[in-house]
Amino acid sequence: MPQVTLTVNGTKHTVEVEARTLLVELLREKLRLTGTHVGCDTSQCGACVVHMGGDSIKACTILAVQCEGADVTTIEGLAKADGTLHPMQEAFREYHALQCGFCTPGMVMSAIDLVNKHPGGLSEQEIREGLEGNLCRCTGYHNIVKAIAAAADVMQGRRSELARAAE
Amino acid sequence: MNVVAPFEGIGASVRRKEDLRFLSGRGHYTDDINRPGQAHAYILRSPHAHAAVNAIETAAAKAMPGVVAIFTGADLAAIGGLPCGWQIHNKDGSPMAEPKHPVLAEGKVRHVGDPVAVVIAETRQQARDAAEAIVVDYAPLPAAATMQAALASGAAQIHEAAPGNLCYDWHIGDKAAQEAAFAKAHKVVTFETTNNRLVPNAMEPRAAVGDFDPQSGDYTLYTTSQNPHVIRLLMGAFVLNIPEAKLRVVAPDVGGGFGSKIYHYAEEAIVTWASGRVKRPVKWTADRTESFMSDAHGRDHVSKAELAVDKDGKILGLKVHTYANMGAYLSTFAPCVPTYLYATLLAGVYTTPVIYAEVKAVFTNTVPVDAYRGAGRPEATYLLERLMDVAAAEIGMDRVEFRRKNFIPVDAFPYQTPVALQYDSGNYFATLDAALEAADWKGFEARRAAAKAKGKLRGIGISTYLEACGIAPSAVVGSLGARAGLYEVGTIRVHPTGSVTVLTGTHSHGQGHETTLAQLVADRLGVPIANVDIVHGDTAKVPFGMGTYGSRSLAVGGSAMFKAMDKIIAKGKRIAAHLMEASVEDVEFDRGTFRVAGTDKTKSLTDISLAAYVPHNYPIEEIEPGLEETAFYDPKNFTYPGGCHIAEVEIDPETGKVSMVNFTAVDDVGRVINPMIVEGQVQGGVAQGIGQALLESAIYDAEGQLISGSMMDYTMPRADDLAPVSVATHTTLCTHNPLGVKGCGEVGAIGSPPAVMNAVVDALKDFGVRHIEMPATPAKIWNIIHARKAAE
């Protein structure tokens, strides 16, 4: 059986996989990182989005063996070691941008990459279009869009978290 | 010790307690569960809509690597079929046709996706590989993919027990009175429409893990359910014959339901039964493709409505005829959806004095249809609110004034409709006026003109709706054919040092119960929500419960908690009276403090709970130790949320695409516990309603193949399909439950589709359009616009 060595949330793993094993299966079934979800089988829903080398990817659309040497971050690896949440996680909670929580890990990982790829900030329409690859059935997206805009302000230094908390 | 916290009781937009685990990847969904020694199930499903199964050859598959066992319908013949929870009676009083719903196909398959065999293997991939090696000898039969095809003479018979593919022919209302009213009418307006079939598509696919313990003989089922006790009752008593004491059902974090996870599904019985056979845990998780062809679908009505009005625009009567698609089998609550959750809503918010409705439920070779967010009430609201617009246009009356003229007056409550329901409270004028103001209805014509100058077609649409939820008074629904009571159960356990565990029979799959229900306790008992733990979703922990659907969790489950808190307070007063050497009648209680009336003598809830568990100074001969109470609450009536939704759309005539410009919702959901969560529920419901109106449709071809069978083909609403929804509430209290709450989970999906479609038709009014069927896709609209242009 093929072997793959990759770093996930800062820890190096060497794992035996079938050649057909997907990255999301490796994460969920071999590493028991069950925060990354599977919501469809056609690469439409985005529940499985993780970061690889800082870019968001759908972990259902890449074979585990293609991830040799990769540096992967999942939702479990976002918060700081002391438990401090990433500003995107904070904003999702503050703006009630999640209900059942199933799409949330992929939505948060996509949103962080979206903000990172737009250092000058995003308009509401750009956020909506940037979420093309992530489906949510609960929220109607409106609070997700608001949360991403607020997190972008914090991540890009336009507004401190303190200022937001004081509102 | 309970510490005074910032206000987090009723009315506070408390941030959700459950969010931290969901946001950090520590949610605990069914597919996240792995039991020691677990095997995996893959279910082989029918590729045919209708076929005889002559033989199933499994020998080659059984020899495949990792295969543990393969079972077919023959192996399960001794167990029961999947039961139906509601029996409807025909016009002549005879019961509906109720054919058996086998767990695995027995000699015949009746829809694409009908389970035929299950492979148990060491890994999911091995189970899937082996399923491909099973050879099924199918003899395809003619299929009835639509209700029209199923009802045609000479149509294929789907069940021997349902001649003519008719499940039931039911009616409600006074036919003679309706005919008399129509005879006196100034005008009768006729309207025909189809309510499009939808696929619920909760983001979490269904999953189930069966875990049999050979030592104890106990079964545990982990499942994606909205109501684990109902599953234990149905599966234990009717399918597998396992007594409740030997069967535990756990519904952990569930990733959305919208109705589709109410029902008892074949896969739950399969993994539980198979686990007992192979003496190992057995896990199954649906692919999304399987969800499309095995989760119960929603809606799918074909209706004709006739509205009789007098010369002043006052409604004299309504007649409705509806065909409702049941699919291939009766899902758990399917028969009640187009009857008691639909036809009883046809009065809406209007004083229509007579109504007569007939409903024929039809079997077809399609996935079973059951309740989907709103369940019957969106179908009724869509029919009625489109009809109101069509009728207003035909009698030459303004559509808002026509509605206002026929509203139930504010002083007419309680209001008895001609179709069984008695509304307890409401103010439809207030929600209408607030919505017209918020949506700037008056300023619309200027916006239409501005859009026109840019080459765009703008429209505005309104819907004034009502729904019945908080399901349901047990005796009433029992008389209407429900085979269960629909009360709820709540236990309040005050621990020795004053923290609280709540056991509730409702289930949260996105609604935020861990927060909202804790707020009820904080508000009443003065315990900070951080010290209130809400336990749900496990039959081993929660005494009983009927689950979450029909916007019932607060109205019914919250009321049960309220009753249990009454008992806690009553017992606490007796203990406090003893400790403070006062008479019980003199002890008052307010948010955590017991006080001897008119004195400064007080005891905290913690003093009382400690005394109750450490009874050193305690009237032990008169009062049992402990501070835990359970209450059952059976609602006295349905609750009746209502309100007004206004949609504004813009159509690009070059592409036919409808863009949502604005959406305004003003809803009366009764008392609001957490405004942030209520707004989120309305936002989400409206998104599903807009999805139905503009995007979504489950499409079968004539052979019964599901054409829209994946997320590549079925148009789920995405972020850029939707516009911001402005949400406001106007409260009239429910008069018959102790919290005054009505329910907010379904209003968005109920009120919004007709508002959107009325806006689309309004945008196209210059093109002579009377009606467009949902979904209003770009292709449909482009064809309307260009047919007109070609004609010119």
Image: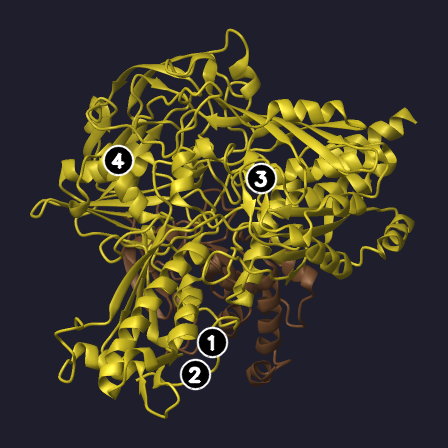
Quarter of image, res B627: bottom left
**Which residue does the image show at 20% across and 77% down from the upper left?**
B612
Amino acid carrying mark 1 in the image: Glu
Which residue lies under the disc numbered 1?
Answer: B8
Q: Is residue A100 visible?
A: no
Which label belongs to residue B345? Answer: 3
**Disc 2 from disc 4: Cα separation:** 48 Å
Query: Which chain's colour is brown?
Result: A
Q: Is residue A35 above or below residue B549?
A: below
Spot occupied by residue B750 in the image (x, y as percentages of width and height)? 59, 45
Give the secondary structure at mark 1.
loop
Which residue lies under the disc numbered 2?
Answer: B5
Q: Chain of mark 2?
A: B
Discs 2 and 4 lie in a common subunit: yes
Q: Nearer the viewer, mark 4 or mark 1?
A: 1
Along the viewing direction, whichever of B549 and B617 lies nearer the viewer: B617
**Disc 4 from disc 1: Cα separation:** 44 Å
Give the secondary structure at mark 3.
helix
Amino acid carrying mark 4 in the image: Ile
Discs 4 and 1 lie in a common subunit: yes
Is B480 left or right of B54, judged from the image as shown?
Answer: right
Amino acid carrying mark 3 in the image: Leu
Q: Nearer the viewer, mark 2 or mark 4?
A: 2
